């Protein structure tokens, strides 16, 4: 009888990596990115890696880096010991009984399970998810200094070297008129050479959104992301009905249940997909399937993960037949350094998937130890 391959240990580390510049959001300004990296060990000697990262800690969502590590160490990891390392669906079902929610934590573990299984079978994570239809994904860049001329200059430089030709602007922390003038000036400067989208990160009321979106639509902005609070699905539906410019649901669409409700209401033109937000690669593909069935366009989102989380997302997104709005998997480019030995390749407006098994990434343990947070 064949000896089963079991999970023997799970380690977690909080890593703090500085950003190349302040990254301004509606709820905070980031000077660094804090991520939880996990290593999942199996009885056959293979180690899978995963990442759980959020934006701005608890100012953004329900999970913080410190909370993620605690959840993994005290609740999720003990439940995984000695169970079948090759049956990912069974392992994740077990975790759903141990902890409700905690989707970022679960996504990191699911990623590590896929990484190890890919190494075990010598295939990519995308292959395990059904197979990639592409080995490159278009990637936008976020202009988030908040300074108009600086953002225009940054966009021009990135266009010149063909690294990005779509730019997102984070707005909502200032008066709407100030933000709208800022966005309008950038769109005017870039013209038809680049798409310009905005992410309000839930900062506007519905009445403010009506005025703001009208002005942004007149300025030629290409897409409006999550203008109002995530719980107000019917408000999103009313805004979508009123305007021509596409409305994208981000924070509002985490689970398949969210996706189903938004689709029934006609509340979004686009779904922003995020593996961490949904609880793992398998769950995010369920969200995508609902969007596809409802005729809702798809977009590969990010929680500004580093290389591990970004490539895990890319592996899942590469299996989708269409990503009409591309992706924003630029997280590694926002950081001053990396903890993998083979960082992702970005060129000609695209992210290239690694060619190796699993994630196709290798941890740089010296860098991990250097940036590891000391308790």
Image: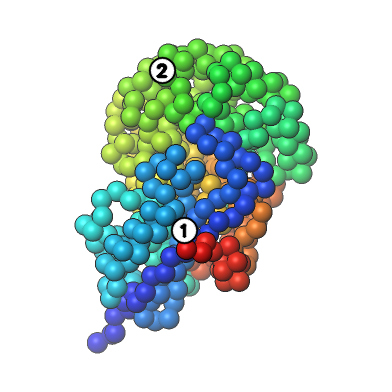
Q: Which residue is mark 1?
A: 36
Residue closest to the far front: 375
Q: Is residue 293 visible?
A: no
Q: Quadrant of residue 180?
A: top right
Observer-nearest residue: 176 or 6?
A: 176
Figure label count: 2
Q: Quadrant of residue 270?
A: top left
Residue closest to the far bottom: 1
State the image coordinates of residue 361 (x, y, percent, origin top left): 55, 65
Circle nearer the N terminus (1, 2) = 1
Q: Quadrant of residue 369?
A: bottom right
Vertical side of 102 occupied by 222: above or below: above
State the image coordinates of residue 93 (x, y, percent, origin top left): 25, 59
Residue closest to the far left: 97
Determine crowd level at label 1: few under 14, some 14-19, many 20+ residues with C-alpha closer than 10 A: many
Classify mark 2: helix, strand or loop. Answer: helix
Quadrant into which the N terminus falls: bottom left
Q: Nearer the viewer, mark 1 or mark 2?
A: 1
Vertical side of 332 occupied by 216: above or below: above
């Amino acid at each position: 009888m064949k000896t089963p391959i079991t999970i023997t240990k799970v380690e977690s580390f909080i890593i703090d990596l500085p950003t190349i510049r302040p990254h301004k959001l509606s709820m905070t300004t980031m000077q660094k990115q804090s991520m939880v990296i996990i290593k999942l060990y199996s009885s056959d000697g293979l180690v899978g890696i995963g990442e759980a990262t959020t934006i701005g800690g608890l100012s953004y969502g329900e999970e913080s880096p410190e909370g993620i590590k605690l959840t993994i160490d005290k609740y999720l990891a003990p439940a995984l010991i000695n169970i079948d390392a090759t049956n990912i669906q069974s392992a994740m079902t077990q975790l759903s009984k141990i902890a409700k929610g905690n989707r970022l934590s679960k996504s990191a573990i699911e990623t590590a399970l896929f990484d190890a299984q890919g190494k075990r079978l010598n295939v990519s994570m995308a292959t395990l998810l059904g197979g990639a239809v592409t080995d490159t994904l278009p990637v936008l860049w976020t202009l988030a200094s908040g300074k108009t001329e600086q953002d225009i200059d940054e966009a021009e430089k990135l266009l010149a070297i063909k690294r990005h030709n779509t730019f997102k602007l984070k707005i909502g922390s200032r008066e709407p008129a100030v933000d709208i003038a800022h966005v309008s000036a950038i769109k005017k400067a870039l013209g038809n050479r680049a798409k310009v989208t905005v992410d309000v990160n839930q900062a506007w009321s519905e009445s403010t959104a009506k005025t703001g979106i009208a002005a942004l639509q007149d300025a030629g902005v290409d897409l409006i992301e999550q203008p109002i609070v995530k719980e107000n699905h019917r408000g999103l539906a009313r805004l979508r009905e009123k305007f021509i410019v596409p409305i994208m649901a981000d924070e509002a669409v985490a689970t398949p249940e969210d996706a189903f409700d938004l689709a029934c209401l006609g509340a979004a033109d686009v779904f922003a997909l995020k593996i961490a937000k949904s609880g793992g690669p398998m769950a995010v593909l369920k969200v995508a399937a609902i969007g596809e069935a409802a005729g809702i366009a798809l977009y590969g989102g990010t929680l500004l993960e580093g290389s591990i989380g970004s490539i895990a997302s890319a592996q899942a997104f590469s299996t989708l037949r269409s990503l009409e709005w591309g992706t924003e998997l630029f997280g590694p480019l926002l950081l001053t350094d990396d903890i993998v030995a083979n960082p992702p390749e970005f060129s000609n407006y695209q992210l290239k998937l690694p060619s190796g098994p699993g994630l196709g990434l290798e941890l740089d343990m010296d860098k991990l130890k250097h940036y590891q947070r000391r308790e």
